[in-house]
Amino acid sequence: RRRFGQNQRSVFGFLNSSEPNGFQDFLKSTKAGSKVLFTPALLWDYLRSNLEPSIMASPDGHRWSLAIDALARAEANGADLHTQNVIKTIAMMDMFQERSGLVPEKGLLEKCLPELTENELNNILITLESWSLLLFKKHKKAYSLYEGSDFDIDAAIEDAYDNVPDLDFEHLKKAARFQPIVAKKHYHDTGALRWMNVDLVPAEQAIERAKQYVPSDGAMGLLMVILGSESDTAQSLAKVCKKVSETNSEWPAIASIAGNSWMIRSHAREVQALEWIKTNNPALGGDTVARREVDTRLAAMKSRLEECLTETLSSAKWYIEGGAPVLLNFKALHSLASEKADQLYASSPKINSELANRI
């Protein structure tokens, strides 16, 4: 069993998987009775097809990135399929040796690559060493991929935290990609398209944000997701939400507490740190492995952050006009937006023409 990010694979799950290059795919493409085996090289193909982003965002990301770079350089040198399979096999053993106890020594490589004779394997290993893609470690009597990059992404992130100590909420809002909550029923009844914006606000700024809120760009209210800090308690955040929901008498401001505030802050800080590394860390200049590692980790963290923010909005309890919190799904939020729009624009004429309403 092995976990890459949020993806966990057991042997049973792998054997029954119908994913591309998986075991079921192998069985369908292999003739019954043949002596063809599912080799570590095929396992590499399966992992790359299905789990590469998760692997790159895991502690194994550096080793995986080294293997990708080795394959790319080998292909550039004209490596054939057998040579590529040797690299993939060694990469798999490198990645799993801490748990399996197996190291890429020559005897084991011969077993994993039955299509190669001993002489053919020796020639490939010699070639890969001459290309500076493999290294023979005498103390282990085994091969490993040449570590042309000594970039430590975790250490780089820790250093970056010192340079970007504060959470940039404007950047976080862009990452959230919150869509406005449209007053759909109101639009259907009146022909006027109106909506409430969704905003992510730190607890210490929430009340002032509600006081000063004035709609712009066609909005008519605010749904405020309040992000707590380590020092905030559930009771203090509830008081803030209640105060926010009753502060602005002119425009509706409705508040909820982000249930996974710590995770959102953690992911957001890492995204900021990785973006700082991309711009400011000189180690990335001539290191393609490091750049790939940072880019993939950044994409994965942005995806996780977006998932956290979406989950927060879809399962939030909302404070409305100083009342007790109410659990509202997206459908209920749209209904609430219509209710508020009906109240605010009760005297507006009903013009069932989108063109006329836009004027």
Image (cartoon, rainbow, N blue to C red):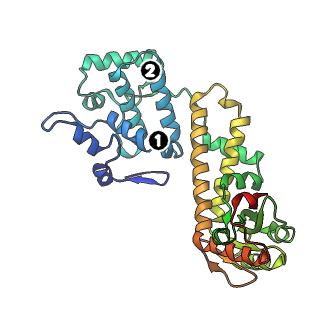
In the rendered image, the vertical position of residue 4 relative to residue 228, given as above or below: above
Q: CA distance from mark 1 to mark 2?
A: 20 Å
Q: How many marks?
A: 2
Is residue 227 in sight in this rendering?
no
Q: Which residue is denoted by mark 1 in the rendering? A: 52
Report the front residue among 323 and 137: 323
Residue 319 image point, x, y percent: 70, 78
Give percent across and percent down for residue 212. 87, 68
* Amino acid marked by disc 2: Ala
Taking depth in this image into account, of 127 and 223 the one nearest to the observer is 223
Q: Residue at x 44, y 23 (%)?
A: 134
Residue 312 is at least partly visible in this image: yes
Please name which of the two marks, 1 or 2, marks the residue nearer to the observer: 1
Residue beneath disc 2: 74
Tell me where residue 310 sits by quadrant.
bottom right
Which residue appears at 70% of the width and 47% of the height?
272
Mark 1 and 2 residues: CB-CB less than 8 Å, in contact? no
| N-terminal label among 1 and 2 | 1
Label 2: element kind: helix
Q: Position of residue 37 (x, y in %)?
A: 23, 36
Residue drawn at point x = 39 percent, y = 46 percent: 99
Furthest residue toward bottom: 323
Q: Quadrant of residue 39?
A: top left
* Placement of 265 over or under 88, stated as above or below: below
